[in-house]
Amino acid sequence: MSRFEEAVIAVLRSLQPGDVVTYGEVAEEAGFPGAARAVGNILRTVEDVPWWRVVGAGGRLRSPSIHRQAELLAAEGVLVVKGRVVSSRRGITLPP
């Protein structure tokens, strides 16, 4: 596993219920600003990370299973409207 992969996985595992971050924020927190797409690749290959807490820029849900992602986020108290996170404990807060 590369240093990048280890750093991204550590950031993902540190997310708590109700946290929502963008791919870019994960990359930046991992120490690799600008590597948002590579974060997406890791989410597709690593199974034991909270993938549902990572969204696209502007709060848009981006997983292959958007409905499942919305369900998991809602169960954590995150408000999702029309496929976009409106508010969360940490991260994105957009007007409805």
Image (cartoon, grey):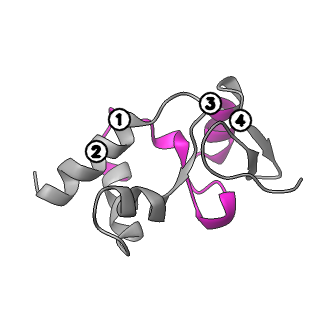
Per the image, label 4 sits on a secondary structure element best described as loop
Q: Is label 3 in a helix, a strand or a loop? A: helix
Label 1 or label 3, whichever lies nearer to me, is 1
Which label was assigned to residue 9? Answer: 2
C-alpha gap between disc 1 and disc 2: 6 Å
* N-term-proximal mark, 1 vs 4: 1
59 in magenta: yes
Please name the residue that numbered disc 1 is placed on: 13
- Identify whether 25 is placed above or below 72: below
Residue 28 image point, x, y percent: 38, 63
What type is the residue that disc 3 sits on? Leu
For image coordinates 86% across by 56% down, the residue present is 95
Question: Crowding near pointer 1: few (<14 within 10 Å), some, many (20+)?
Answer: few
Tell me how far mark 1 sits from mark 3, CA to CA: 16 Å
The earlier-in-sequence mark between 1 and 3 is: 1
Horizontally, residue 70 falls left or right of residue 9, namely right
Give, as a single range, the part of the protein colored magenta. Answer: 44-73
Q: Residue at x 35, y 71 (%)?
A: 33
Q: Which mark is residue 72?
A: 3
| Circles 1 and 2: CB atoms closer than 8 Å | yes
